[in-house]
Amino acid sequence: DARVTQTPRHKVTEMGQEVTMRCQPILGHNTVFWYRQTMMQGLELLAYFRNRAPLDDSGMPKDRFSAEMPDATLATLKIQPSEPRDSAVYFCASGPRTASYEQYFGPGTRLTVT
Amino acid sequence: AQTVTQSQPEMSVQEAETVTLSCTYDTSESDYYLFWYKQPPSRQMILVIRQEAYKQQNATENRFSVNFQKAAKSFSLKISDSQLGDAAMYFCAYSGNTPLVFGKGTRLSVIA
């Protein structure tokens, strides 16, 4: 049963600290997406990759967020320095090589910045 | 820009009954896809059903079916024989030339 995995599942950190979230997409999927979910804003697309190349990261605060795909099996989302307003659930999703942007989501990382 | 609107923030249904969740979207694209995702309390986003805009036939997946009205830009989800496990947030999503655009969601409660 192929699925997207994310680590950590929960993270509590202090303001100013660096946070790194990791995602392993489904094997064979060539698109990877990062989302942030909050009660106020709902689901927001932060960035996405196709064949490991970043296609769009316009949803990310550039000064503190960065997203990378070091290889086809790992995507990372880093926040440095973290702020309380970054508290949210961060989802990674991957999709197959189709035209529909069909996506399968990981379980999410719940981030709390105090 | 494409937008997706779910006008029902909350709905409830009796167990074993049928419920329909509404979704409308705005686009100028002719070729696109529509999806319904379910998010139970576990937070996991689960793909429920997808519809290709070029197909006239409405998609079905077991107890889940859609009513796709392309001219009206409407894409509603019908859940038949509702079960307690159907209680969740349901998100409608659109995908055209850009990745998914999500609605704000509808919280569905199932009453035993």
Image (spheres, helix red, strand yellow):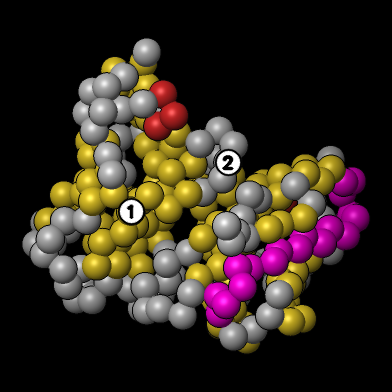
Quarter containing the C terminus of chain B = top left
Q: Which residue does the image show at 75% across and 69% down from the upper left?
A: A76
Residue B45, percent from left and from top: 51, 49
- Residue A20 in the magenta stretch? The answer is yes
Residue at mark 1: B49
Does A17 appear above or below B44? below
Highlighted range, magenta: A13-30
Does B1 appear above or below B37? below
Asked if labels 2 and 1 share a chain, the reply is yes
Q: CA distance from mark 2 to mark 1?
A: 18 Å
The chain under label 1 reads B
Q: Amino acid at mark 1?
A: Ile
Q: Which of the 4 image quarters holds residue B98? A: bottom left
- Among numbered discs 2 and 1, the one appearing first in the sequence: 2
Residue at mark 2: B43
- Please rate how many residues cluster around mark 1, counting C-alpha atoms within 10 Å: few if below 14, some from 14 to 19, many from 20: some
Q: Is residue B109 left or right of residue A74?
A: left
As rendered, which of A109 and A73 lies closer to the eye? A73
Work out whether residue A81 can be spotted: no
